[in-house]
Amino acid sequence: IRSILGRPDGGAGLAGQKVQISGWVKKGREQGKGKFAFLEVNDGSCAANLQVKVDASVSDLSKLVTTGTSLTIDGCLKIPPQGKATKQKIELSAEKVIDVGTVDQHGKTPYPIPKTKLTLEYLRDHTNFRARTTTMAAVTRIRHKICLAAHVFCDKHDICYIHTPIITTSDCEGAGEMFQVTTLINQSEKLEKDLVKNIELTEAEETLAKVEDRSKLKPGLLLPRKDGKIDYSQDFFARQAYLTVSGQLHAETYACSMGDVYTFGPTFRAEKSHTSRHLAEFWMVEVELAFAGVEEAMNCAEALVKDICKYLLEKCLDDMELMKNVDEACIDRLQMVALTSFERVTYTKAITLLEEAVAKGKKFENPVELGLDLASDHERYLTEVLYKKPVIVYNYPKKIKAFYMRLNDDGETVAAFDVLVPKVGELIGGSQREERMDVLMERMEEKRLPIKEYEWYIDLRRHGTVKHSGFGLGLERMLLFATGMDNIRDVIPFPRYPGRADL
Ligand code: 4AD
Ligand code: MG
C-alpha cells in the first residue's frame, strides 16, 4: 500500500493497473442498500489506508466490513469519482476476494481494537493487537528506522558490529540488578537428561528440599521445587549465570583486539523502577572505541544522535508527521538536534547551575547536592529550560559511577559522561575506561566487587592495554525523544516491567 499511496502523486498515476493487496480492515461500511461496500485497508507499510470498493457481486460484504478482518484482494486501481469527500487520489476496485480472515464478533473475547479512540494504557493490556493502531504502527516503523540509522552510522565510521552474549556471569555495572538464569526440568525427566544423568537426590537433600528458606541451602545443590521441577542452572553453566545488563565488558575485549566495535542487543535490569523511562528489558547500542579518550567518545555519541535525527527526517517524515498528533514539537526537536552542537558542562558546573535555579525559587522533586546523581527533573531542567538543547554532563564523582570508568587526576571524579536530551533526560551513558590495571583493581576493591570474577576483564589491562572509551544509547529513550511518546512502555513491542512479562 505504501508503494501505491506513498508516491508523490498519491497513486493517481497508477490508475488502470491491476494489483493484489493484503491487509486488515480499519473501517468498513456497506452502502447503496447493501449493493457495495467501502473498506479502508491498512497493511502496516505506512500509516495511510487504501480505500477498497467491493461490489456485492464480488463477495459476501457482511464478511468483509468488520474492523480487524484480514483480506487479500485482486483489483484494479481507479481514480475515485470527482466531488467525493475523499482525500484519496486512488482507490481499489475489487475484482476478486482471494482470502478473508474474519473477526469473531460473538465469542468470549471480542476484538479489542474497535474503530474508536483507545488509550495507551488500554492498549498495553492488548499488546498482541496494539500494532494495529495507527500510532503504535508508526512508532514501530520509526523504531525500525532508528535501528537502521545506528547500523548505517557505525558502518560509515568503520565500527564493526559484534554480538555480545545475553547470558553472562559478569555484572557489568556492578550494581547487582541482574536477573538470574534458572534451568528447570521436571523431576521425571531428570534421569533422561544427559546433563543430570548421574544426579539423584540423596535423602539429606530431600529433607533440605522441605526447608522453607532456600537461601540458607548450600549453593549448587539440586533440589526439587514446590512445583516438582528441578533447578540445575548452576550445573549447566558450572556457576550462576544472569541476563546481561550491558554488553560493554565483552565489547571492550573486541575493541582491545580489533579496534572500534559496537554491539546492539537486548539488555536486562532487575531494578524495581516504576517510571515512564525504565524497562526491565530494553535495547542498547553500545559503541567501544579503541585508542580513544573520553572526548572522542563524546564526539562520537553526539554525531550518532545527530545522524539518527537526520535519518528519521529523511526516511520517515510521513510517520513523523503522524507523531505530531502525540507531540506537536517532535519534528522541530529532531531538526534542532540535527543542527545544533550539544552543550558540554562538567558535573560540578551542572550542580552549580541547578543550585542557582533553586536559589531563584525553582522547585525540584529531588535534592540538588554535590555528590548526588542528577535526577530526571534536573536533567530536563538543564535541557529544556536552561540550554534548550542536548547537554553532555561529564566528570562525575567516582562514588556515583561504575568501577570501570577512568579516574581523573583529581582522584575524585571519573571521565564519565551522560548525554541528556529535552523531553527524556538521560539518553546515553558513557566513559573512558580505566586502562591502568592497578587503578582498576583499586576501584574494584573500593566497590567491594569480587575481583576473581572479573579476571578475564583485568587481563585486558595485563596484556597490551590501551586507552579506550565507549558509550551506550538506550534505544527506547531515543524513541521517546523522537516520537514524543510519554511512556517507555509504549515504544517497545512487548514491554517488560515490574508486574508484566506476559504477552
Ligand atoms: O547508563 P547506563 O547504565 O550505561 C551502561 O550500561 C554502560 N555499560 C554503557 C556503555 O558504556 N557501553 O545505560 C546506558 C543507557 C542509558 O543512558 C539509558 O538511555 C538506557 O541505557 N537505559 C535504560 N533504558 C530503559 N530502561 C532502563 N532501565 C535503562 N537503563 C539504562
Ligand atoms: Mg547511566
Image: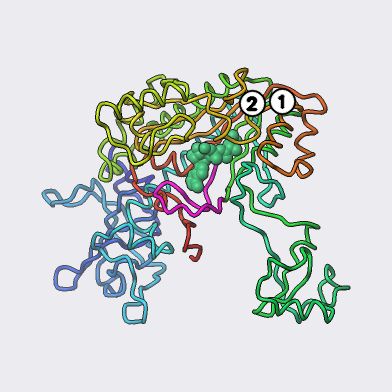
| SS assignment for the magenta stretch, majority | loop
Residue 86 in view here:
yes
Circles 2 and 1, Cβ within 8 Å, touching? The answer is yes
Where is mark 1, residue-wise? 435
Q: Position of residue 236 (x, y in %)?
A: 78, 62
Q: Nearer the viewer, residue 314 or 98?
A: 314
Structural crowding at the residue carrying mark 2, measured as other residues with C-alpha within 10 Å and reported as few (<14), some (14–19) or many (≥20): many
Please tell me which residue is depicted at 41% across the width and 38% down the height of the picture.
Answer: 375
Residue 386 in percent (x, y) is at: 31, 25
State the image coordinates of residue 304 (x, y, percent, origin top left).
Answer: 50, 28
Magenta-drawn segment: 269-284
Q: Is residue 65 left or right of residue 420?
A: left
Ligand 1 under 8 Å from disc 1 Cβ: no
Front one among 108 and 305: 305
Residue under numbered circle 2: 406
The image shows residue 353, relative to residue 472, as above or below, that is: above
Element type at mark 1: loop
* Secondary structure type for disc 2: loop
- Going by the image, does 147 lie left or right of 139? right
